Amino acid sequence: MEKVEIIGVKGLPIIQEGDDIAELICKAAEKQGTPLRENDVLVVTHVIVSRAEGSIVNLETITPSEFAETIAQNTGKPPELVELVLREAKSIVRMGNRNLITETRYGIICANSGIDKSNVPGENTVALLPRNPDRSARRIRTRIRELTGKNIAVIISDTHGRPLREGEINIAIGVAGIAPIRDRRGEKDLFGYTLRVKRTSIADELASAAELVMGQADEGIPAAIIRGYAYLRSDEASAKELVRPKEKDLFI
C-alpha cells in the first residue's frame, strides 16, 4: 500500500434514538465529496451508536443500593453513577484511587463499565455501551451495503486507558467485516528471523488512527473513513478476540 487516508465525516446531526446512523453517515460523506468506497473502513464512536439505540440514562432516575453508596464513598463518584456501573458490570476487576474498573456484561474490561458523559446532551445524562457492539457494527455495515452497494468494514470505538501508560487511546469494542488481529507468527523479519509471538491488533490501531481526525471536544466528528488500508476481511469476526484471557493477563 502506498498511503492510508483518514477522512473525518463532518456535518452529522446530533444523533437521536431511532436515527439511521448508516444513512446519515452516507449522506454526510457524499455531501463533503468523500462518498464511501469499496473496502473502506468506517470507524464510529460508540456514543452515537448508543444514542441511536436508546442506551441513554438519566442518573436522576437511578436509586443507588447500599453497596453502591459504599463504593461511592471509597471512590468519590456519585452513588447513582456507581449503581449504574454495577448494573452494567459482570464483575469488579479493580477499585481504588478514585478508579472503578469493571468487566462489562459483554466481556470488555474498562473504567466505569464504559459509561460515558462526553458528547451526551443533558447535565445528568450518560451513555451506556451498546448492548452488543459487534451486532451494532454488523447492522451498520449491512445497511451501508444496502444503501451504496459497497462492501466495507465497520469498527465501533471507545476511548480507554492502558496499564503502565499515561493517556487514553481509541480502541475497537465492536467490529464487522474485518479480522481484528493480524497473526504474523511464522513470517520472517528483515534478517530472516521467524516471528513467534507477533499478533497485531489491527482494529485497535485503526480506531486510534481515526481519533486523530475525530476528537471529542473540537468539531464533534463522530465518524471517520479510513481508506487505502489492505485489511483481512472476515464476516465472522468479533472484537471479543481482542480481550486477553484472564489466565494470560498479568494485571487482573
Image (cartoon, rainbow, N blue to C red):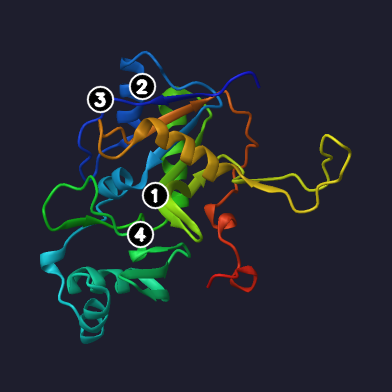
Q: Is residue 142 visible?
A: no
Mark in the foreground, 3 or 1: 1
User: Mark 3 to mark 2: distance in Å?
Assistant: 9 Å
Tell me what residue is drawn at x 57 percent, y 23 percent: 228
Amino acid marked by disc 3? Gly
The residue under label 4 is: 114
Which comes before the other along the chain, label 1 or label 4? 4
The residue under label 2 is: 29
**x and y, in percent, of residue 172 in the image:** 48, 48
Amino acid marked by disc 2? Ala
User: Mark 3 to mark 4: distance in Å?
Assistant: 26 Å
Indicate which disc residue 159 carries. 1
How dense is the environment of label 2, judged by Cα within 10 Å: few (below 14), some, or many (20 and up)? Answer: many
Frontmost residue, 175 versus 157? 157
User: Mark 1 to mark 4: distance in Å?
Assistant: 9 Å
Amino acid marked by disc 4? Gly
Mark in the foreground, 1 or 4: 1
Residue contact between numbered discs 3 and 4, judged by CB atoms under 8 Å: no
